[in-house]
Image (tube, rainbow, N blue to C red):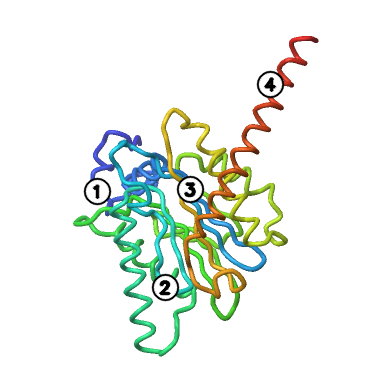
Amino acid sequence: MTSVGTGYDLSNSVFSPDGRNFQVEYASKAVENGGTSIGLKTKNGIVFAVEKIITSKLLVPGKNNRIQTIGRSIGAVYSGLLPDGRHLVSRGRDEFNSYRSQYKEDITVPYLIDRLGNYVQAYTCYNSVRPFGITSIIGGIDEDGTHLYMLEPSGSYWGYKGAATGKGRQSAKNELEKLNLDELSTRDAVKEAARIIYQAHEDNKDKDFEIEISWISKEETKGLHQFVPEDLLNEAKQYAEDKLNEDEDEDEEDEDENMEE
């Protein structure tokens, strides 16, 4: 039996004959149209970075952040529909505050992601709602160390050393796999995150973009989730541009050698 065009894509509470939930798949397509987001888990912290496409020259730089704080030591970045991301972060903050009010201590990152995963999954079960149109990368530090997870529209979540989502996710994932994240310092990871975002943007280079980077580190931020300082951000941008230019020069040299042969 065919599933396409037979009405099985009109509801997220009905499976197609081959066991697919089309509304969840459509939500994932919305994520693929968003800017690239990445998360890195280093030997002593977490780094988030996101590519924000500038859709209008009238937009104020630094506003409409896609990296947000859930708890003091927990942050999140997401690709997809901006309002859906804000709602999920708001839900995460409610979970954080409720846990702290009840148990007088901060929620652990694995327990938080489990709660959020169940919440997102519930939106795939009922006809009166739609799935979240975002994939979020959530990470933080607790008593058990550093944690990084990626939460998908289906409610599935996985623990990662490095995670990428959005339009340039494949390019970003390839670059993340080349890094030795277990030995990388958080400060160096900020520069690498900028480089990866710049490289992922090459597939969309006809549009201007803005980069956001935040970090969590006991050494650098005393365990708090914060945006990186302006001087470090500028240093990371310069590092990314230099690396990009180096790669372009090498490609040109390779082309010249091939033509001579």
| Furthest residue in direction front, as rendered | 231
Q: Residues within 10 Å of mark 3 (few under 14, many from 20)?
A: many
Q: CA distance from mark 1 to mark 3?
A: 25 Å
Quadrant for the N terminus in the image: top left
Relative to 137, 253 lies left or right: right
To which residue does mark 3 refer?
165
Along the polypeptide, which appears first: circle 1 or circle 2? 1
Instruction: Give SS at disc 2.
Output: strand
- x, y percent for residue 29: 38, 41
**Label 4 element class:** helix
Circle 2 residues within 10 Å: few <14, some 14–19, many ≥20: many
As helix, strand or loop, the secondary structure at mark 1 comes to: loop
Q: Earlier in the sequence, mark 1 or mark 4?
A: 1
- Whole-number angstrom distance, CA of label 1 to CA of label 4: 51 Å
- Report the mark closest to the observer, 3 or 4: 4
Q: In 3D space, how far apart are the residues under numbered discs 2 and 3 (Cα atoms)? A: 22 Å
Q: Are marks 1 and 3 in contact (CB under 8 Å)?
A: no
Disc number for residue 252: 4
Instruction: State the residue in front, 81 or 5.
Output: 81
Report which residue position mark 1 lands on.
11
CA–CA distance between discs 4 and 2? 47 Å
Amino acid type indicated by mark 2: Gly
Does 101 sit above or below residue 46? below
Tell me which label, 3 or 4, sits earlier in the chain: 3
Q: Amino acid at mark 4?
A: Glu
Label 3 SS:
strand
Q: Position of residue 171 (x, y in %)?
A: 57, 39
Q: How far is the residue under mark 1 from the one under mark 2?
A: 34 Å
Residue 71 has which mark?
Answer: 2
Residue 63 drawn above or below residue 8: below
